[in-house]
Image: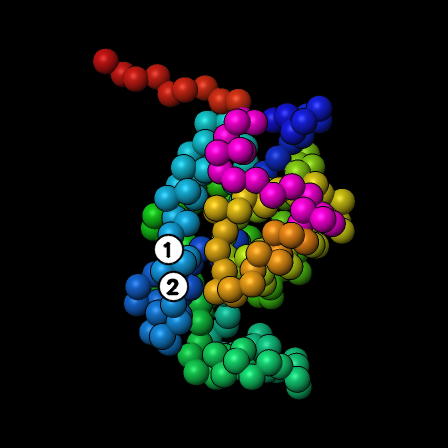
Amino acid sequence: MRIGKHEVNPALLIIDMQNGFVSNGGSYDLMGIEISKYQKIIPNLQELIQLCRLAKIPIFYTQAVREGTGIDLLTRTHKILPKSREERIKTRPICVRGTWDANIIDEISPSKQDHIVIKRRDSAFQDTEIEVWLRSFGIDTIIFTGIDTSICVESSLRDAFNHGYDVILISDATSSMNKNYYSTTENVREYYGLVMTLDELKATLSYETPRIRK
């Protein structure tokens, strides 16, 4: 894949597209949180995943999980939390490991060739194996998608940059509850990497068109 004059070896990273956050009947939906913005990016993610598979770009999914015992809850390690986040934690256990809530949504279900990174904090780089896996592929650039743009996507993107990876944020394949999430895209443009639309990224990809069987 060529970006400008540079040849890069990218991976696609899809952040937290799980039933608990995105699906009707998931934890967020049952708590009355508006999830339609999350659902709107599903078609673009489906197209992007297909394109990356054709271009033989490795695909990584993050899966945010919590233990049923509550041992890994933020309220066990933090004395000071924003009220809204603390209330969500206390209201309902979200994405408990091994439950439907924690599963990646069916619409973009991982294939056997894809890779799932289990995470327990906002960043995909916090106490996970993702960097070992990325290095094994010789990845130098990460394409960021998923939710929430201004929280987990941005936290992961900042860590990736500071670990030496080039970063690309796909603006129409991420979504946020935060009405001011555009500040994330501006931060990326000003300090971290590239912000591209799906169509702009497509123009940089080279891949084989599938043969039609007669």
Examine the structure image and report whether residue 203 is included in the region drawn in magenta: yes
Q: Is residue 123 depicted above or below 193 in this figure?
A: below
Residue 72, image quadrant:
bottom right
Q: Residue at x 76, y 44 (%)?
A: 164
Q: Which residue extends farthest left?
A: 214
Residue 181, image quadrant:
bottom right
Q: Position of residue 214 (x, y in %)?
A: 23, 13
Residue sitting nearer the eye, 33 or 181: 181
Please tell me whether mark 2 sits on a helix, a strand or a loop.
loop
Residue 208, image quadrant:
top left
Q: Position of residue 29 (x, y in %)?
A: 35, 69
Residue sitting nearer the eye, 123 or 172: 172
Q: Is residue 117 depicted above or below 85 in this figure?
A: above
Q: Which residues are magenta?
A: 188-205
Instruction: Give the amino acid at mark 2.
Output: Ile
Mark 2 highlights which residue? 35
Examine the structure image and report whether residue 160 is included in the region drawn in magenta: no
| Residue 129 visible | no
- Alpha carbon distance from label 1 to label 2: 6 Å
Q: Residue at x 34, y 48 (%)?
A: 107
Label at residue 39: 1
Q: Position of residue 36 (x, y in %)?
A: 36, 60
